Amino acid sequence: MQHIPLAQIDPAEVERLLDRAFGPDRHTRTAYKVRGTALALPDLSFAAVADRVLVGTVQCWPVALLGDDGAAYPLVMVGPVAVDPAHQRGGIGRALMTRALTAAGLSGADRALALIGDPEYYGRFFGFTTDRTARWRLPGPVEPRRLLARGPAVPDIPGMLGSRPALDARAAAA
């Protein structure tokens, strides 16, 4: 199994894998609304390839919390972590998460990370919690227990989570 930069994979192949992993209606999910039109961060997005076949991906996105105080707090949204259904339960997703977090600086205090996911998994293995996300709002439904973050730079304030390009445009118009 090789882990390579996602930028080396044909985007159409990535889309097919995401459809297999999450279904073709995945674009309606709240995480997609949060990311908006942002492009994945190439230095934090990876692919798992086995015998030249794409079997998994992890993507990370530039987002921000627009605080009710008017300030924008940059974060990195982790996910989706997608593994081809035929290859699930083999540790591919965990390895991809570890690779992305290592690239982000696992102990690096300068990155605030957020994700929407299973707290039992992402908390246990990667240290994500709801400790600072209780007052965050999102542009769609989310179970509060699934809105997770990690890192000392994560803001513990009320605000709206969204893509950095959208927030930058909103701030420029104000």
Image (cartoon, helix red, strand yellow):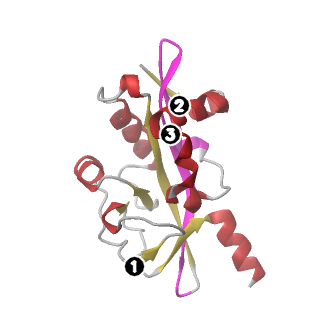
Residue type, label 2: Leu
- The Cα–Cα distance between marks 1 and 2, rounded to whole angstroms, is 33 Å
Q: Residue furthest top?
A: 51
23 in relation to 27, above or below: above
Mark 3: few/some/many CA within 10 Å (<14, 14-19, 20+) = few
76 in relation to 154, above or below: above
Q: Nearer the viewer, residue 121 or 104?
A: 121
Mark 3 — residue?
Answer: 23
List x then y, in percent, for residue 143: 36, 65
- Tell me if 48 is positioned left or right of 117 in this view: right
Circles 1 and 2, Cβ within 8 Å, touching? The answer is no
Mark 2: few/some/many CA within 10 Å (<14, 14-19, 20+) = many
Q: Please state the extent of the stretch shown in magenta in the rendering.
A: 42-69
- The Cα–Cα distance between marks 3 and 1, rounded to whole angstroms, is 30 Å
Say which mark, if any, is on residue 89: none
Q: Residue at x 53, y 47 (%)?
A: 26
| Residue 145 included in the magenta stretch of the image | no
Q: Residue at x 29, y 62 (%)?
A: 129
- The Cα–Cα distance between marks 2 and 3, rounded to whole angstroms, is 9 Å
84 in relation to 97, above or below: above
